[in-house]
Amino acid sequence: MVSERLLFTYLRYMLSKKTKYGLKALTYLASQQESTPVQISGIAQHENISQKFLESILLSLRKTGFLGSKKGKGGGYYLIKDPKDILMTDVMRVLEGPIAMVPCVSLNFYEKCDDCPDEAGCSVHRLMLEVRDSALEVYRSRTLADLIS
Amino acid sequence: MVSERLLFTYLRYMLSKKTKYGLKALTYLASQQESTPVQISGIAQHENISQKFLESILLSLRKTGFLGSKKGKGGGYYLIKDPKDILMTDVMRVLEGPIAMVPCVSLNFYEKCDDCPDEAGCSVHRLMLEVRDSALEVYRSRTLADLIS
DNA sequence: GTTTATCCTACTAAATAGATAGGGTAATTA
DNA sequence: TAATTACCCTATCTATTTAGTAGGATAAAC
């Protein structure tokens, strides 16, 4: 078998920076002893993230019920729930989108593939169903509390 | 919790068309009784794939040792190995690239994340390690023969 | 009323996906 | 050996997405 490394001009990875940064920010907030608001700038510095980009990520995490925020001096973001009660399935779906690799096996974002007439007879469908289930098993068994080192 | 559906303007799925088409083509070839070459046009029609796009995919599958080809009349592509001996791990790595979702947990395409000073202490790293292992378990246990319905 | 920090909209550069075009080359068959 | 067939290869193209930037509006604290 020929080495693949040479045949790729780029590498297709699957986790977006948005998700990565979001997870890091959530973990950082969860690791704080006090539940006082933490400023965006503090999180950005500690986790090496572009502050403006992080801003939009935290905003979406607030809108989806993971974070609360406080404006003005002494303001910032804080976790609304106990880290033990924040499932990775929920976090991933908000940050990354579907956990499934194809729309036709997505639990929360199901869509029929337009190029595939027979879902049950589709080899890709069956394989990706197994992959989805294996990923779900991980995300369902892990909470934000598990991410704290 | 707010519905996510409305917050996404697009959905980020993770399997490329290239991989999807490649898997379908391989499955189709594996399902042929005879081991005579099958023309690109035949595969493209049967699987609803752009012929020119499929051409490039089959070419890369030939270069990586999965397929053989024959030119001229009666030519086409054919499987070189027994479908039972073609592991999904190998197919996925050739078509899709790394199985890992981040470079820092990739077995075959490892790279250090530039924004992350401490790999061992990184929450994303640890989570993605588990996800990678769960996906590997599926891909290692499945061969092309399993995809035939 | 000034400072602080989140909120919100719009914009942008670079990369990538998913093709498409067009001809070159090799093998077969007549 | 000439015509046909079908793979081989390079180049190009467009829409989408990613990751980020800019700049100000708004609300809270002091």
Image (tube, coloured by chain):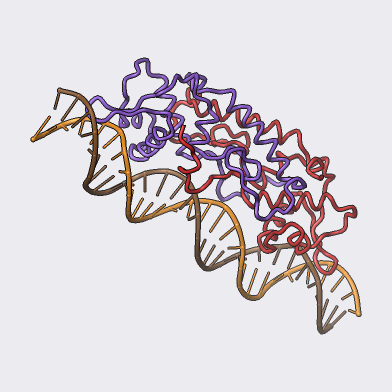
Chain colours: A purple, B red, C orange, D brown
Question: How many numbered marks have been drawn onto this rendered protein structure?
Answer: 0
Spot occupied by residue D8 in the image (x, y as percentages of width and height): 71, 62
The quarter holding residue B132 reads top right
The quarter holding residue C20 reads bottom right
| Front in this rendered view, residue A41 or B112 | A41
| Front in this rendered view, residue A27 or B8 | B8
Quadrant in which the N terminus of chain A is drawn: top right
| Residue A83 vertical position relative to residue C1 in the rendered view, above or below | above
Q: Residue at x 48, y 26 (%)?
A: B122
Q: Is residue C25 left or right of residue B111?
A: right
Query: Which residue is most to the top?
Result: A33
Q: Is residue A123 left or right of residue C16?
A: right
The quarter holding residue A42 reads top left
Q: Residue at x 73, y 34 (%)?
A: B140
Q: Is residue B124 left or right of residue A107?
A: left
Spot occupied by residue D21 in the image (x, y as percentages of width and height): 31, 46
| Residue C22 vertical position relative to residue D7 in the rendered view, above or below | below
Spot occupied by residue A136 in the image (x, y as percentages of width and height): 62, 30
| Residue A98 vertical position relative to residue D8 in the rendered view, above or below | above
Query: Which residue is most to the front?
Result: B2
Q: Residue at x 87, y 58 (%)?
A: B36
| Front in this rendered view, residue B20 or B93 | B20
Spot occupied by residue B54 in the image (x, y as percentages of width and height): 69, 59
| Residue D21 vertical position relative to residue A114 in the rendered view, above or below | above
